[in-house]
Image (cartoon, rainbow, N blue to C red):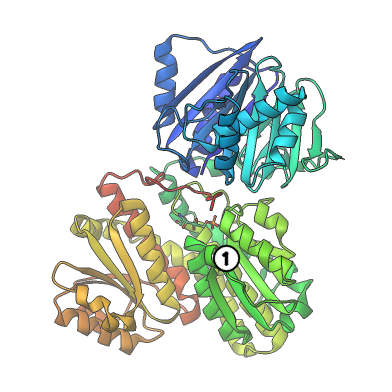
């Protein structure tokens, strides 16, 4: 979703802004813009489309942009179409205030009417232009400093925001503020960086401040940062954290796309998820998850678990439901965070909420967890991004340690989430004695083998390329799975939709006959996840039903399978594993298939149209 970048210091701001915007591209955007300030003025350029189009526009203007203060933005349209006018930065009526914004101002319409009645005019359709003019109005009416006008205005708005604003008459100050949408500050030596996440400034400084909801910061050249509460202007002490980013992790290296790199990263990222948590020796198998250990009684006495998440994280939640119910015997529900937050869910002190989110910034998941918190539930987070909003708002949690995921289509975060959920299920199962000790040991041992088995699946990539060539022109796909592989069918279909724009649906295989079977004819490829362990005979029957209607079958089978091997049009052979660990293996060929089909169709795999990596608005 929208990306924010800014610089204040002694360097030329322009290249920092442009390079920073490029590092934010992965969040998803449809237009971009920058503004660089000099004494009593600024250059401002915006363009719809890619950042290269913005660069071309600036280049062809012939202007050399110079200045040590600047702000930049990638916009993911909410209010108003994707064009140059609606792109950020937005400027107040006097042309003095320049602002960028991520989020949605829900009461912008009411504010706009007040401003229109007071003579203000608007060029764009955005809520951002309304906010920058509200700030200007409050500033000039009450003869206030910019920081006080920002503070008072933000107390008037309903919605979510992270903003950065500069007054052209004082280009040595940037004011930023946050509620709901993320913003971080990089603190260098006599310089500040601001960005939606620390990736754009990681090469300059590892000192980072994660602004919290309801906070604003006044950044002044050669001065200490001034952190305040928006509600009452109380001064706060900034907490500077050390960034732990390996810069190599945010580069594609030898791979053509981040998505491919991240698929290939999985043997390593799962090892990273397991590191220090799964301890295996010849006779001991121990799991350590500090977030569970320090809240042992909560988990032992839990009345229910509700998993809240969106998209791919919701799919891993569905897999978590199978794992947690099976091994802990605690009733589990999985909810779309976006629905949960608007119901009146029946949860209380004895219930546990597991919030799953790669980015840790998904607005729906964050709101849903806040609602559950207000009802007294214990909140456990599974996030990939350390220090993210969700990670900061939970009672306890476990990071997936999958490293930065840049491709918009989530891959390695998904397998990281499943790995954490498996560790949790086993640990709680042992605490509650709801898992047989022998099975526990077998699963620990097999979990440890998963990275190796994924490496084996990655070796059949060339074969998957061949299958992709055969099916790349299709317009529809069905994905079927049963038991714990049903959510994998959903995830396979989502991956294909996201990167190739082919219509795809996932179903539990047995549901076919209740409707989707009407779609089957000789034009319908059906991907069936058919490992030997778990409903094999039943899946064989489902395959027969499809064959009888001339559907084309691509089956994910185990090495050594005979029956499905004979029935399917094409088979993808993967190593076998325990039924409850299957999703970690079966999803890999589906990720590769989606990736390859999208590549053959010439789609922008890492930044698919209309999608954002981190969905920070409702
Ligand atoms: O960051 P989160 O895990 O909370 O994101 C949730 C979804 O937006 C995300 O999984 C989305 O569905 C991805 N595009 C999936 O590839």
Taking 354 as reference, is 385 above or below it? Answer: above
Count the labels in the image: 1
Q: Secondary structure at mark 1?
A: loop
Taking 234 as reference, is 99 above or below it? Answer: above
Q: Position of residue 310 (x, y in %)?
A: 51, 62
Question: In terms of depth relative to the viewer, which is nearer, 130 or 307?
Answer: 130
Question: In terms of depth relative to the viewer, which is nearer, 95 or 67?
Answer: 95
Residue found at x 52% / y 80%: 322
Residue found at x 43% / y 53%: 409
Taking 416 as reference, is 483 above or below it? Answer: below
Instruction: Kindly indicate the quadrant of the structure image that contains residue 429.
Output: bottom right
Residue located farthest toward the front when viewing the structure as drawn: 117
Residue tagged 1: 342
| Position of residue 351 in the picture relative to residue 515 (left or right) | right
Can residue 434 be seen by looking at this rendering?
Answer: yes
Can residue 400 be seen by looking at this rendering?
Answer: no
| Position of residue 518 in the picture relative to residue 501 (left or right) | left
| Position of residue 161 in the picture relative to residue 311 (left or right) | right
Question: In terms of depth relative to the viewer, which is nearer, 348 or 411?
Answer: 348
Residue found at x 25% / y 81%: 564
Q: Position of residue 419 (x, y in %)?
A: 56, 68
Residue found at x 43% / y 72%: 487
Any atom of ligand 1 within 8 Å of the CB at mark 1? no
Dot 1 alpha-carbon crowd within 10 angstroms: few under 14, some 14 to 19, many 20 or more: few
| Position of residue 538 in the picture relative to residue 433 (left or right) | left
Q: Position of residue 535 (x, y in %)?
A: 37, 87
Question: In terms of depth relative to the viewer, which is nearer, 407 or 166?
Answer: 166
Q: Position of residue 251 (x, y in %)?
A: 50, 40
């Amino acid at each position: 979703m929208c990306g924010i970048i800014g610089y204040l210091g002694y360097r030329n701001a322009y290249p920092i802004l442009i390079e920073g915007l490029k590092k934010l591209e992965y969040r998803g955007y449809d237009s971009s813009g920058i503004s660089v300030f000099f004494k009593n003025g600024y250059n401002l350029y915006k363009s719809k489309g890619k950042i290269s189009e913005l660069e071309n526009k600036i280049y062809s203007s012939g202007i050399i942009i110079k200045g040590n203060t600047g702000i930049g933005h990638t916009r993911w349209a909410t209010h108003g179409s994707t064009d140059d006018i609606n792109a950020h930065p937005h400027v107040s009526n006097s042309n003095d205030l320049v602002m960028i914004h991520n989020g949605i101002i829900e009461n912008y319409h009411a504010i706009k009417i007040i401003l229109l009645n007071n003579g203000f005019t608007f060029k764009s359709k955005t809520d951002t232009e309304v906010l920058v003019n509200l700030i200007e109005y409050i500033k000039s009416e009450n003869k206030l400093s910019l920081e006080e006008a920002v503070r008072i205005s933000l107390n008037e708005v309903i919605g979510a925001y992270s903003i950065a604003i500069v007054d052209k008459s004082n280009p040595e100050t940037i004011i930023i503020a946050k509620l709901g949408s993320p913003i971080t500050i990089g603190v260098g030596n006599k310089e500040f960086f601001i960005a939606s996440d620390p990736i754009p400034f990681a090469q300059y400084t590892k000192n980072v401040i994660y602004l919290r909801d309801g906070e604003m910061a006044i950044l002044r050249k050669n001065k200490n940062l001034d952190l305040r509460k928006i509600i009452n202007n109380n001064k706060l002490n900034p907490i500077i954290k050390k960034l732990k980013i390996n810069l190599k992790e945010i580069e594609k290296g030898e791979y053509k796309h981040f998505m491919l790199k991240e698929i290939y990263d999985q043997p390593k990222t799962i090892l990273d998820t397991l590191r220090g948590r799964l301890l295996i020796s010849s006779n001991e198998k121990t799991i350590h998850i500090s977030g569970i250990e320090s809240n042992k009684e909560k988990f032992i006495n839990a009345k229910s678990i509700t998993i809240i998440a969106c998209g791919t994280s919701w799919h891993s939640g569905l897999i978590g439901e199978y794992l947690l119910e099976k091994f802990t015997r605690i009733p589990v529900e999985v909810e779309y965070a976006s629905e949960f937050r608007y119901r009146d869910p029946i949860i209380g002190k004895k219930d546990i909420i597991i919030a799953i989110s790669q980015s840790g910034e998904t607005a729906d998941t964050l709101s849903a967890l806040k609602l559950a918190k207000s009802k007294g539930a214990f909140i456990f987070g599974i996030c990939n991004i350390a220090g993210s909003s969700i990670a900061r708002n939970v009672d306890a949690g476990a990071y997936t340690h999958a490293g930065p995921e840049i491709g918009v289509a989530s891959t390695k975060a998904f397998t990281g989430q499943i790995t954490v959920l498996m560790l949790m299920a086993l640990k709680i199962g042992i605490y509650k004695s709801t898992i047989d000790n022998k099975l526990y040991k077998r699963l620990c041992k097999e979990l440890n083998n998963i990275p190796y088995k994924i490496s084996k699946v990655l070796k059949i990539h060339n074969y998957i390329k061949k299958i992709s060539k055969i099916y790349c022109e299709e317009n529809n796909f069905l994905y079927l799975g049963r038991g714990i592989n049903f959510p994998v069918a959903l995830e396979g279909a989502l991956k294909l939709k996201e990167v190739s724009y082919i219509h795809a649906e996932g179903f539990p295989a047995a549901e076919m006959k209740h409707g989707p079977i009407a779609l089957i004819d000789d034009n319908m490829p059906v991907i069936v996840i058919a490992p030997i362990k778990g409903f094999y005979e039943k899946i064989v029957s489902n395959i027969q039903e499809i064959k009888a209607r001339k559907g084309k079958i691509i089956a994910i089978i185990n090495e050594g399978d005979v029956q499905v091997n004979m029935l399917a049009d094409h088979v993808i052979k993967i190593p076998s594993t325990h039924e409850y660990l299957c999703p970690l293996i079966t999803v890999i060929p589906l990720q590769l298939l989606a990736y390859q089909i999208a590549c053959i169709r010439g789609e922008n795999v890492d930044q698919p149209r209309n999608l954002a990596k981190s969905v920070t608005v409702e």
